[in-house]
Image (cartoon, rainbow, N blue to C red):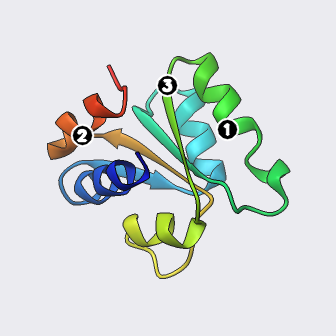
Amino acid sequence: MSDKAYEAIEIARKTGKITKGTNEVTKAIEKGKAKLVVVAKDVTPPEVIMHIPLLAREKGIAVVEVEKKADLGASAGLKVGTASVAILKEGEAKDLLRELGVK
């Protein structure tokens, strides 16, 4: 599932729209703009992102957890790690998002 999430982020970054970072992802969830939220498990302290999966599920947005923030950052086109990424417009990643449980 992690590999599909990384691939979906890479495709959406090129053909759609993504947002990166805890604050931006939280705003996207609250506004109902996020289609898929991906969160890294190795964020310290975990309280930084603890609210994101809860908020996303509350809004009916699919959430995928991945192991490393460095890999998540790389798939989002960053040279540094990121705690979370949200796909706002899927672009050509529509089929991948469907496989990840996005309606």
> Quadrant of the image for the N terminus?
top left
Q: Residue at x 49, y 63 (%)?
A: 72
Res. 52 mark: 1
Q: Residue at x 28, y 32 (%)?
A: 99
Distance Cα–Cα, label 1 vs label 2:
22 Å
Foreground mark, 2 or 3? 2
Residue 31 x, y percent position in the rendering: 53, 27
Q: Amino acid at mark 2?
A: Leu
Q: CA distance from mark 3 to mark 1?
A: 10 Å
Which amino acid, mark 3?
A: Ile
**Label 3, on which residue?**
61
Tell me the residue that label 2 is attached to: 96
As helix, strand or loop, the secondary structure at mark 3 comes to loop
**How far across and down, in percent of the image, does residue 81 sit?**
57, 72
Residue 70, compared with residue 36, is above or below; it is below
Dot 2 lies on which element? helix
Q: CA distance from mark 2 to mark 3?
A: 15 Å
